[in-house]
Image (spheres, rainbow, N blue to C red):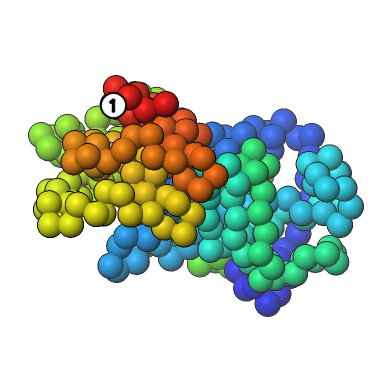
Amino acid sequence: MSGSQSSKVFMFDNSDPEMQRAYETARATFRYFWREIAWERRRIIPALSLACVKMPFSDGAADPGTQDASQVEQMWVGEIDFDGRVVSGALLNSPNWLKTVQVGDAVRRPLNEITDWMYAINGDVYGAYTVNLMRSRMNSQERESHDGAWGLNFGDPQKIRVAPEPKKSGGLMKALFGGRGGATDPEHPMSAAMGPPLKDQLAKDPSMLHSKDDRGWTLLHHQALAGSLATVEILLECGADPNAATDDGTTPVQLAEALGWDKVVALLARKGAR
């Protein structure tokens, strides 16, 4: 996708039930996108070749969701940040007809207004619910042309990848990842692997437990929002405050609740989080 050019336009009825379901599923699974972004920020060698979120934009009403397809452009946003409520970033597309936004603009939307997300590792795409719905309505030649323009492997449009599958082996890997979905969400491998070195770091520098960034977030806030159960547990064991508040008064348990990380919420609650 070139930010200097207008993107190809795909028109559809905004009341299309399948498209509405794609929007809803993208919002419901956004936590997996954010978890990968959170760990990407800690990687020495980047793994993601692409990470973006789709949002609706309009020149008219403040709420693009109230406009019909002829008045709204669905565009991709990169450099994503998320504070537990609002998704923000920089517009990657040049609008085809809108006049009030342009490529590179800083934009933001509440999580319940985003319409899709995707990231790519080694050329394989994860997420892309609306993209795959459109791909499912293309013939094989159109899909090949579409995928070639992106230069990515979107895979089977009926089998959307949400997160990389763990390597198929028993023992440790099975114990780390368990099943998929709900209360058995697999732990991110970086969270599990980070345990021993994190303990060592905290022993050498306990101030890490309480230091805050420019928004008043502690390491526990960041790990709670990313759903990192193993690292949250270590932070709490080492003395992190489960009720530490950010500058706007948000606690770690509220951040975990925002994305439905139930096991992290339960752990924090056992430690007296409110």
Taking 242 as reference, is 114 above or below it?
below
Residue 166 point in image, percent of width and height: 26, 43
Frontmost residue, 73 versus 62: 62
Q: In which quarter of the image is the N terminus?
A: bottom right
Q: Is residue 95 left or right of residue 146?
A: right
Q: Residue at x 27, y 41 (%)?
A: 240
Q: Which residue is drawn at 69% across and 34% down?
A: 20
Q: Which residue is drawn at 19% across and 52% down?
A: 206
Taking 29 as reference, is 204 above or below it?
below
How many numbered discs, if any? Answer: 1
Q: In this view, does 96 lie to the left or right of 178?
A: right
Q: Is residue 155 visible?
A: no
Q: Name the residue under label 1.
A: 271
Frontmost residue, 176 versus 1: 176
Quadrant in the rendering for residue 239 = top left
Q: Which residue is drawn at 78% across and 41% down?
A: 65
Residue 94 point in image, percent of width and height: 73, 69
Q: Is residue 224 visible?
A: yes
Amino acid of disc 1 = Lys
Quadrant in the rendering for residue 177 = top left
Residue 148 point in image, percent of width and height: 55, 66
